[in-house]
Image: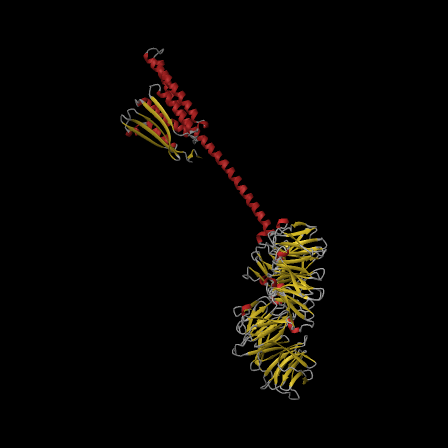
Amino acid sequence: MRPHIFLSLVLLFFAEAGVAQNFLYTTRNYTAVDGLPQSQVTSVVEDDNGYLWIATQGGGLARFDGKEFKVYTTKDGLFSNNISSLLFDHDQNLWILHAHGITRFNGHTFKRFQNRRTPNAMYRRVFEHGDSIFFISSDGATGKIHHDSLYSWGKPALKGEKQIWRSLQTPDGVQCFIMDDGSFRIKTLKETFSFEPDEKFGKIYFPFIYKGNIALRTSEGYSIVNYKEKKIEPLSLPIKHMILSYDEKENVFWTRDGANLFRETVHANETKRDTILKDVSVLQVVKDSEGNVWFASDGRGLYKYFIQDFNRCSSEKLRGVMAILSDRKGAKWLGTLNKGLWRIKDGKITSFVDAHESYRNNIGVVKEGPDGTIWVGTNYGLGRYDEARNVFVWYTREKGLAGNLVSAIEFDEQGVMWVGTANGLSRYDGKSFHNYNTTNGLLNNGIWHLHYSKRYKTLFLATDLNVQTIRDGKIELVQVRGLRNTSIISILPYQDSLLTLGTGGAGVIIYNPKSRASKFITTQEGLASDFIYFAAEDEKHNLWIGTEKGINRVKLDRKLEMEENLYYGYDNGLTGVETNLNAFQLTPESKYFGLVDGLYEFNDLSDDPSRSFDLHLTDIQVFYGEYDPRLYADTVNGFFKIPVDPKLPPDKNHITFYFNRVDKRYPKSVKFKYYMENFDKKWSQPSSMSEVTYSNLPPGNYVFHVMSTDKQGSWSYKKIAYSFSIKTPFYQTAAFIVGLIILIAGIITLILYLRVRQKVNKMLMMERIRVKEQETLRKEIARDFHDEMGNQLTRIINYISLLKLNGNGTGNGSSDLYTKVEDSAKYLYTGTRDFIWSIDPVNDELSKLFLHIRDFGEKLFEEKNIQFRAFNEVKDKIKLPYGFSREANLIFKEAMTNAFKYSEAKNVALMLKRSEPDGFEMSFEDDGIGFLTGDIEKSNGLQNIRERADRVHGVLRITSVKHHGTKITLNFKLTKTLKYGLAL
């Protein structure tokens, strides 16, 4: 690496003389690509909130807050998308002048004005005077709008043929009309008068405001209109070009010559001219409240002329500055990407470039040793500067270095040098290297950065995996809580006892080596990126945080909470944006940063007295604009007509708040925090989002709080506290709830009353049914018992009477009578027993009915040796309705008795089975002689059986074939039917 001396300064980096002011300024062009609706800008004005309102020729109206353009067109209410000029009145209404009409915008709605009698009239200027808005037509006539009514449209300004040629308004509200004959008409707040100058001063080219007065450029030179004394006074100015605007604060004339724009200053009657724009036709120059100057151009969009926070101070030959060092002898060293090492001293620039080993021209770190020796780390070895010979001596792996790619150099208290490489760590005591790698304690051989802390007497290593320390030769791992699988890029001191850790994706970590506590600062807190190259502290305890997206200047309070945060990027002069690990120098006198495209110097504008605009609400929407909240408020406030303390219905509880703070110099640094009182538990995280939506808010009173950062990046004390309420729905009011409780209690009472009444009625009905049933049962029992008992007793009486007639009852006839009396008594006993069995509720079960009939059949048929069989296929317990057992029992006893007496059968069978899912079939069958079914009507017994079947709602079938037996079948369903007045 040999030195090369440049006689001319290709760098402005360390020039002894101060940089001319115009080098601190730059221009930014906004076109349709940036959101400007049209490139022909005709007028620009600034409102009290800091917004720029931009008129275009065909694209409508645009509102610019430094970040984005909001466009208004005829769809929003404009009279036309072609706009000539703009004016804000004292009530902050925006008046928009079109060729054939006027639009007023009050921040919320548009109102259009046009003279319908002369719709083709053309107008070229608008101004305010008193409480009226005046307009000037192309033919010099005037008109006005007063209280939204149009008056005197087309009325001449003066009687006669005089017409208005130009007009101008002074800062104190005096309106000056220049007539086409050279006379003047003046409108003050108190009077209106005209005058003609005593002397001819030539042709008037253009008027302008100069130090609060109306100045004229004429063919004879410059003049001042002294309207108080009604005369024209000469003005000495050495300006030759057309004056567009005069900045009294800076004493700057903005002038134009054709399509070129100039910035001119006058000192001792001499002019200094800077060319700002070439081949751009500028129509208007406006300086805003933040010190920015805006140019409205005809076809080239909108231009912003402003002071840069960073000034690139290197030439195109010096790009990719990777390291910066100022040594104790006053020399400045710059390590570059592929351009070698540069030294600046005493106005001379020397470059060290290795023509044989190109990897050594990639300088990543430059350090000065305790003895003043300059050391550099390259992609191929460690270099030591030999000042006597003005050359570098190189150390590589062949000489004991751990690796050839050197990324970090650090010195401890004993003057020992530590070298971080891609292949491990080296300790150099001036004679030899001692290396550390994964074999003797390192987690990873790749070392990003080194920092030696005198306070802790410890060397800190930044690696791909974590932080490690070396103290007294012992390697330890530092466990940073909350950090996983993230590289540590840099380690730098902060506030004496703390460290800043720049990470490869987790932001900045403020680490306390003593307590091992850590505090993360990430993009959630407002950083440009979470990939951090460095986080270095300056003399004011600001943290300068370099990322691949620019630089953040952050100030933390005692609790390490963010107090200030300013972001610097492309819009602030950092064209290259991406910073580098070791490329920064922070001193009280200057601050320099190396980026991928060169070297940049910071211009401290913290003492700039420019205005910082207040935070404000721009809109409140209910259900995304479906409903207007202004309908639920008594008054509105501010330019955007925000409703004051609206009381919203309960179903209008989806609210979106739009808020903003205009900062046209640092638009990307503006952050917001919000908090909904009575809903949120804490403030939101800082964010650049300027809107928030709350959905499904419950009824209640709320206060929406929002705060923002100011132009210094600190949280402003001026906050918004917006009160509103959501009404309680009628069904949640106390009166409704009390009434509802009373109603429910009444309904419950009524229901209970009706239920009790129903139960009582049911009990009464059951009692009546029970009484009726008992009466019916008694009648039936009496009838049956009378029939059975009466019949048998009559027979017994008859038999006894016959016995008396036969004397002592001897002989064969008497024996037969005794037998008949005995049979009648048995029958009486059996009938009485069956009757008592049938009325017992325990026997109201199908299986017990079957068993009872079976027992009867077994005793009956064994007397004649008739074979009797019984089959029961129903195993379930089936409850029978009251009275069913008795009727069924009598049916089948009658059938069995008839078979016993008359059938001459050898075999009989009783069977019970299911016939349908809810039906049953009980049958009795014999193999006797049978009978003709036509005789059923003649048989009282069989007729009696059928009547009993009808009583239990059963179907009785009698099948008999002569000499083939008889079968009696009873089919029945145990469904709910009425029997004796009961539901069975």
Q: Can you give x and y, in whole percent of width and height, for residue 443 in the image?
A: 62, 50
Q: Nearer the viewer, residue 411 or 233?
A: 411
Please say if 531 is above or below 932: below
Side (left or right) of 632 relative to 826: right
Q: Can you give x and y, in whole percent of width and height, for residue 849 in the image?
A: 41, 27
Which residue appears farthest toward the left when viewing the image?
A: 962
Q: Can you give x and y, in whole percent of width and height, for residue 894 in the image?
A: 35, 25
Q: Can you give x and y, in whole percent of width and height, for residue 581 in the image?
A: 63, 60
Looking at the image, which residue is at 32% across and 13% down? 813
Please say if 24 is above or below 736: below
Residue 60's quadrant in the figure?
A: bottom right
Specify the quadrant that holds the C terminus: top left
Residue 615's quadrant in the figure?
A: bottom right
Residue 673 appears in view: no
Please say if 928 is above or below 458: above
Q: Nearer the viewer, residue 472 or 265?
A: 472
Please say if 123 is above or below 390: below
Specify the quadrant that holds the N terminus: bottom right
Instruction: State how many labels appear.
Output: 0
Residue 300 appears in view: yes
Q: Nearer the viewer, residue 237 or 778?
A: 237
* Colouring used for the render: secondary structure
